[in-house]
Image (tube, rainbow, N blue to C red):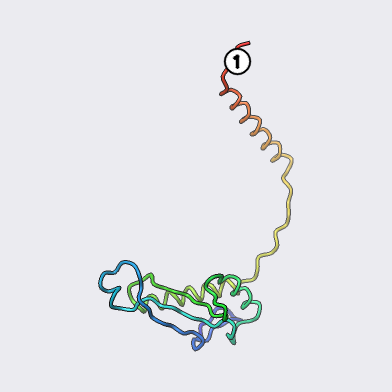
Amino acid sequence: MIRINDQVAIDESELSEAFVRASGPGGQNVNKVSTAVQLRFDVANARHLPDAVRARLVRMAGKRMTKEGVLLIEAARFRTQERNRQDARDRLVALVEAAAAPPAPPRKKTRPTKGSKERRLEGKQQRSVTKQARKPVRPE
C-alpha cells in the first residue's frame, strides 16, 4: 500500500508498469535497454479512492487519462529502470496528493480602495504629461 494521507491509499496491485525504450541522448544504451517506464493506474476501478478524490484526479490528469479511466504516467528522465520507476511513482503520489487536498476556499470579491484609485489616476496623468512633452512643438 502507498499511503497518501489518512483517508487515501493506493494498492500497489492496482499499478502496472511497462518498460519501453526511451528517446533522447544516451548513446548505444538508448538503443539496447528499455529504461523508460509507463505506469498505469486504473482510477475508475481503484478501491481505496473516495469519489470526490477520484473526480478531482480525473479532472487534474487531463491528457494523461485514457477513455477507459486509466491514468498513464511516462517517466524517462533517468538512465536506469529503477530511478524511472521511482520517478513515475513519485509523480503519481504527487498527483493524488494534490487531488486529495481540500479545495481552496472561494475568493471574496473586493473593491479597490479610494487611495489606490487616486494613485492609479495620478500615474496615468503623469504618463500623459510625459508623452505630451515628447511631441514636437507646432509653430503658431
Question: Which residue is at the far front?
Answer: 67
Question: Which residue is at the far top?
Answer: 140
| Percent x, y of residue 117 | 71, 39
Disc 1, SS: loop
| Percent x, y of residue 51 | 65, 80
Q: Is residue 59 above or below residue 7?
A: above
Residue at 49 percent across and 81 percent down: it is 40
Residue at 56 percent across and 70 percent down: it is 62
Residue at 57 percent across and 81 percent down: it is 68
Taking 114 as reference, is 102 left or right? left
Residue in front for this viewpoint, 114 or 41: 41
The residue to which callout 1 is attached is 138
Report which quarter residue 31 is drawn in.
bottom left
Residue at 59 percent across and 86 percent down: it is 45
Q: Looking at the picture, which amino acid does disc 1 mark?
A: Arg
Taking 31 as reference, is 67 left or right? right
| Percent x, y of residue 103 | 65, 68
Question: Which residue is at the far bottom?
Answer: 13
Q: Is residue 69 above or below residue 129?
A: below
| Percent x, y of residue 118 | 71, 36
